[in-house]
């Protein structure tokens, strides 16, 4: 089973990056999302809901679409007859209005096809028509265009399914059916509906699962070996299996609910959100669960699919391993990267408490700062790997969250750990096995620590600070919010501090000159190549950012080095030791690679 899954999802290697002006999305496949299939094309809309990923080779590789125009998606559908036509349902930020976006280039770009007064919660294709469910009722379009509200359609529509020549809708908490031009309602609880042939399954979180074998004309309640009334998932898959997930576990029935089999799905992929299949492979199902997207043939054995849409907070290289810290754990793969699928540090990460905010590597040792919870307290867990990020051991824990870990370049065993949510940072003298706290009342939250032979620099929400005694005392050098700081390893007098929109540069280690207006977007991480070229990330929370900026004069001036592939924003940057490759950890596009020649 595992070998077959691996063969189905094998990734075709690509060549090592040569000189190029474009970015390559190299993974990791660290995001799940809502699913749509048409012929041999798969689409995934990650939970962030701001772009679509497309695979034309059944999940072997993925192409990232451009960010949506001022809208967050909540559902998508692909036209079975025209696989490159895709609809996304969602809402516009701030006003509560709804939108349907339409793409005819396989999700690469979208335009607004329909605007509604309230959020659009679902879209579907059926026959020659397309449908959208919203608070006003059900809209019908032709190929995703020329929409109009269906007369008599129920208000508060949440989910729409085309079942043969009929329409079955979850609206107002119950089932509604459009048959032969007439609407009828049934007192069957429903917020989600799925169908196969004439069989329809309706489920509601607190209302159970109900089954119809005549396209919604009559219904019966589904019962099984569970006692919980909270339905986490309920539906029918393309091969005819009824699936129910409750607080008691995950159950499958191959005979319309007559008998049931319990699976280990909850332990392996956590809570199901959606299941989908390629039309010609109904027995192979993709599951969107809390841990991402997985492929399975029995809901006992799973192969992680995912899409390269992870939020990458940190990057590190150790030996032949490159490691990415994300919102759901860390991933690693060998250099040079040839596949979007990387090794994952767990099979089913918890929904909270597995955010990797910082990474540091030296001499075969990798440290990571994992932001989680101990009880109700925000806690940093410092974990150590001696095998390039393949396995981890927890060494220490302390209050706060972290975005910065750094080895002292001079003193063996000394490690600095930045913290926010507490006015302190931490110092280790034994290589990260234990830490002591350095409390300083002016600190408001450290984003980055940079170390040199003379001490450390702290980029803090309250300013740039300097310490020359391992953090026993700190002195403010610059006021204002600082997001990052870098010391030139070739000359410690050259320091670059990054504010919200400005850059501050020093060439004597004491006085700084501001370079204002570097970007209208928030500036983030900074990195330097061996030759001294600087790269700076930017993040936009509305629209698109410049992605990456570049400076060849030590930070005095900057030019755009980004592009549409990284315009959602860059959280972390890493230049290879040979200076030939730049890696950018993005907000929702995993890691992008660009050749530097």
Image (cartoon, grey):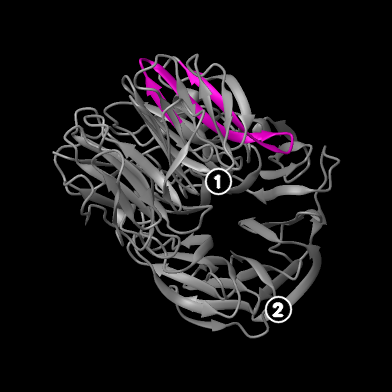
Q: Viewed as shown, does residue 337 lie left or right of 97?
A: left
Observer-nearest of 561 and 54? 561
Q: Quadrant of residue 254?
A: top right
The picture places residue 170, in percent across and down from the top left corner, at: 70, 66
The picture places residue 414, in percent across and down from the top left corner, at: 45, 19
Q: Residue at left 33%, top 43%?
A: 526
Query: Which mark's residue is nearer the viewer, 1 or 2?
Result: 1
Q: Is residue 320 visible?
A: yes
Comes first in the chain, label 1 or label 2: 2
Q: Residue at left 63%, top 28%?
A: 398
Badge 1, how many Cα within 10 Å: few under 14, some, many 20+?
Answer: some
* Callout 1–callout 2 Cβ contact below 8 Å: no
Report the span colored magenta. 359-385
Residue 400 vs 524, above or below: the answer is: above
The picture places residue 421, in percent across and down from the top left corner, at: 60, 43
Observer-nearest of 207 and 549? 549
Mark 2 element type: strand
Residue 132 vs 221, above or below: the answer is: below
Observer-nearest of 364 and 48? 364
Look at mark 1 in the image and give the residue it sits on: 444
Q: Is residue 283 visible?
A: no
Q: Residue at left 46%, top 66%?
A: 87
Mark 1 element type: loop
Observer-nearest of 482 and 189? 482
Badge 2, how many Cα within 10 Å: few under 14, some, many 20+?
Answer: some
The picture places residue 109, in percent across and down from the top left corner, at: 35, 64
Mark linked to residue 509: none
Specify whether residue 104 is painted magenta: no
The secondary structure that most of the magenta stretch takes on is strand
Quarter holding the C terminus is top left
Look at mark 2 in the image and give the residue it sits on: 183
- The CA span between labels 1 and 2 is 59 Å
């Amino acid at each position: 089973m595992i070998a077959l899954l691996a063969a189905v999802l094998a990734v075709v290697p690509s060549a090592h990056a040569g000189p190029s002006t474009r970015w390559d999305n190299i993974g990791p496949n660290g995001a799940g999302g809502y699913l749509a299939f048409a012929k041999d094309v798969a689409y995934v809309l990650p939970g962030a809901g701001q772009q679509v990923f497309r695979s034309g080779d059944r999940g072997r590789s993925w192409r990232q679409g451009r960010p949506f125009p001022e809208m967050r998606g909540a559902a998508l559908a692909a036209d079975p007859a025209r696989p490159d036509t895709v609809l996304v349902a969602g809402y516009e930020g701030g006003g509560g209005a709804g939108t349907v976006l339409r793409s005819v280039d396989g999700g690469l770009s979208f335009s607004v096809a329909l605007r509604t007064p309230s959020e659009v919660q679902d879209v579907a294709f059926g026959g020659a028509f397309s449908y959208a469910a919203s608070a006003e009722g059900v809209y019908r379009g032709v190929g995703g265009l020329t929409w109009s509200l269906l007369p008599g359609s129920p208000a508060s529509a949440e989910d729409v399914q085309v079942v043969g020549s009929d329409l079955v809708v979850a609206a107002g908490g119950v089932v509604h059916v459009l048959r032969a031009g007439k609407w009828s309602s049934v007192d069957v609880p429903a917020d989600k509906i799925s169908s196969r042939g004439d069989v329809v399954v309706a489920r509601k979180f607190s209302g159970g699962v109900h089954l119809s074998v005549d396209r919604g004309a009559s219904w019966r309640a589904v019962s099984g070996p569970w006692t919980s009334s909270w339905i986490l998932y309920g539906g029918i898959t393309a091969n005819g299996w009824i699936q129910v997930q409750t607080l008691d576990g995950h159950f499958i029935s191959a005979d319309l609910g007559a008998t049931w089999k319990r699976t280990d799905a909850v332990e392996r992929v956590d809570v199901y959100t959606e299941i989908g299949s390629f039309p010609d492979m109904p027995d192979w199902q993709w599951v969107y669960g809390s841990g991402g997207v997985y492929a399975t043939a029995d809901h006992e054995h799973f192969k992680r699919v995912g899409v390269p849409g992870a939020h990458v907070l940190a990057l590190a290289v150790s030996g032949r391993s490159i490691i990415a810290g994300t919102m759901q754990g860390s991933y690693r793969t060998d250099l040079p990267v040839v596949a979007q699928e990387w090794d994952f540090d767990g099979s089913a990460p918890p929904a909270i408490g597995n955010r990797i905010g910082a990474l540091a590597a030296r001499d075969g040792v990798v440290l990571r700062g994992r932001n989680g919870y101990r009880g109700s307290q925000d806690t940093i867990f410092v974990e150590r790997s001696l095998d390039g990020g393949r396995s981890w051991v927890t060494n220490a824990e302390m209050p706060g969250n972290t975005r910065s870990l750094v080895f002292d370049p001079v003193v063996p065993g000394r490690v600095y750990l930045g913290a926010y949510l507490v006015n302190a940072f931490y110092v280790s003298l034994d290589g990260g096995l234990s830490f002591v706290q350095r409390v300083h009342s002016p600190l408001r939250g450290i984003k980055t620590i940079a170390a040199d032979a003379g001490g450390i620099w702290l980029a803090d929400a309250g300013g740039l600070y300097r310490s020359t005694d391992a953090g026993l005392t700190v002195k403010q050098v610059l006021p204002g919010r600082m997001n990052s700081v870098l010391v030139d390893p070739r000359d410690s007098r050259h320091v670059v501090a990054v504010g919200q929109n400005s850059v501050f540069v020093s060439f004597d280690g004491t006085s700084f000159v501001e370079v204002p207006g570097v970007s209208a977007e928030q500036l983030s991480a900074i990195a330097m190549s061996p030759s001294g070229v600087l790269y700076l990330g930017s993040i936009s929370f509305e629209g698109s950012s410049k992605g990456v900026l570049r400076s060849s004069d030590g930070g005095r001036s900057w030019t755009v080095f980004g592009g549409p592939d990284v315009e959602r924003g860059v959280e972390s940057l890493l230049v290879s030791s040979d200076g030939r490759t730049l890696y950018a950890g993005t907000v929702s596009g995993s890691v992008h690679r660009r050749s530097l020649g």
